[in-house]
Image (tube, rainbow, N blue to C red):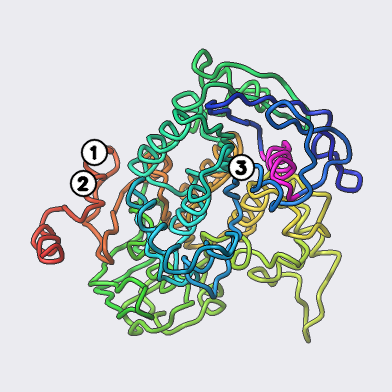
Amino acid sequence: MTKRFGAVVANEDVALTVQPGEIHAVLGENGAGKSTLMKIVYGALRPDSGEIRWDGRAVQVRNPHEARALGVAMVFQHFSLFDSLTVAENVWLGMDGKVGLEEVSRGIQQKAAEYGLDLDPRKPVHVLSVGERQRVEIVRALLGDPKLLILDEPTSVLTPQAVEKLFVTLRKLAATGCSILYISHKLDEIRALCHTCTVLRGGKLVGTCDPTQESTGSLSRMMIGAEPPVLVRRPPRPGNVALTVKDLSLARWDRYSVPIDHVSLEVREGEIVGIAGISGNGQQEMLATLSGEDPRAENGMVRLFGAPIGRKGPAARRKLGLHFVPEERLGRGAVPSFSLANNMLLTRRESIRYVGWIDRAFLGKQTRGILGRFGVKAPGPGAVAKSLSGGNLQKYIVGREIDAIPKVLVAAQPTWGVDVGASAQIRAELIALRDAGCAVLVVSEDLEELFEISDRLHVIARGRLSPSIDTPEATVELVGEWMSGLWPGNESRVAEGAA
């Protein structure tokens, strides 16, 4: 397969063979051409040259409808969901119209229960977290009983428990003869799950291997030409309290959201505080309160260096030094149709001169600086945000906020969909911010990430926040237990909720 986008060659003479019942990994750094190749197989893109053979015969896959007719289903890294419709309506739209909405709703509930994916078909998509949206995409794909299932970064925002459940699901599917193409940057997952691994670098095929016979280091060398850099950490030196949330309680903003229940936390200068939790337990609602998108909190419930900011909007908070990385890249972190330079203006105003004039030369230089510092693969500042791969767009958004030298940084899923080398770089940059005196709050469903960079940990469950625990004292088992709300002093509330 060969596919070009202007002067950029995304895939160059790439060959791939998948056997029935095989879980086949496609590995490569951000911008290596993995998603492009998968979209060609799914009919979302047409190749410039090359051929697809299905069960030994040549086929033309001109669009996703024809791919689905063959038995190909795909879960995209960037979700293809309509925000204003319910979960059931989104799934129903992708079906052939021979089944009713009620039947689709029952099918969703059955599939979700069968594979341990908590999902309410009546919920509108706009109230779902990133993790919940990923569940919608996975269940929608499973409902079609596919012969080939393509998964693009399916575990990027799932907890370890959810990942284990998904792996059980995928092994069951493979045992029935369904083939699975699995894109992931998590090398340990590929080694644990996949039978075969095809590695791409710079749009070209590097080789194919048996990942069970490889080490994490050898896979990394195939993917990026080197082993991932070792993260160097010094003990934290916490300073003054920078961000304070005190007894924050908020009613649901609609009937599907999670109420915030007496949440309190502190983040000091020179420390990273992590918040773990299963998707849909109040992370979205708490983050909206911290960023200023939801200004319903009483003024004194959220404080920045002692000053009340509960009623201030996002722009006012940025002026005081609080910057924010949202969990959703396209639509919230960046405007898809804007250039990278224009997307800078969403949160960075240094290029705006007196009486509103924009210094375009400075803006371009500023954008190029971020692209270079964070290794973002893009033609330049004029590249449109939606043209970047998911990982490269993530590096740009995180880089934009880190480059602002914030006093407080709140980051949601900072390394979602980012390759192993870039993930190590982002984590190192967050630690460098901490060492420079910034207060950093990271909300993530990647426990490995939180254990690696956090000095203290909280867990959020059903809109309540656990006490903090120093990371060296925490274990995966303890955090998993707390994700059910079973931390000291909260057991009775969990029992009341169950009753």
Q: Which element type, helix, strand or loop, lies under badge 1?
A: helix
Specify the quadrant of the image occupied by residue 354.
bottom right
In this rendering, position of residue 90 left or right of residue 330:
left
Task: Identify the mark nearer the N-term, 1 or 3.
Answer: 3
Magenta segment main secondary structure = helix
Q: State the residue at coordinates (88%, 40%).
A: 48
Q: Does the magenta stretch include residue 39?
A: yes
* Point 50% across, 81% down: residue: 313
* Mark in front: 2 vs 3: 3
Residue 446 figure quarter: top left
**Which residues make up the magenta segment?**
30-44
Secondary structure beneath disc 3?
loop
The residue located at (30%, 50%) in the rendering is: 457
The residue labelled by disc 2 is 481
Q: Which amino acid does label 1 sit on?
A: Glu
Label 2–label 1 contact, CB within 8 A: yes
The total of numbered circles placed on residues is: 3
User: Going 70% across and 32% down the picture, which residue do you hit?
Assistant: 54
Give the quarter of the image for residue 36: top right
Residue 71 disc label = 3
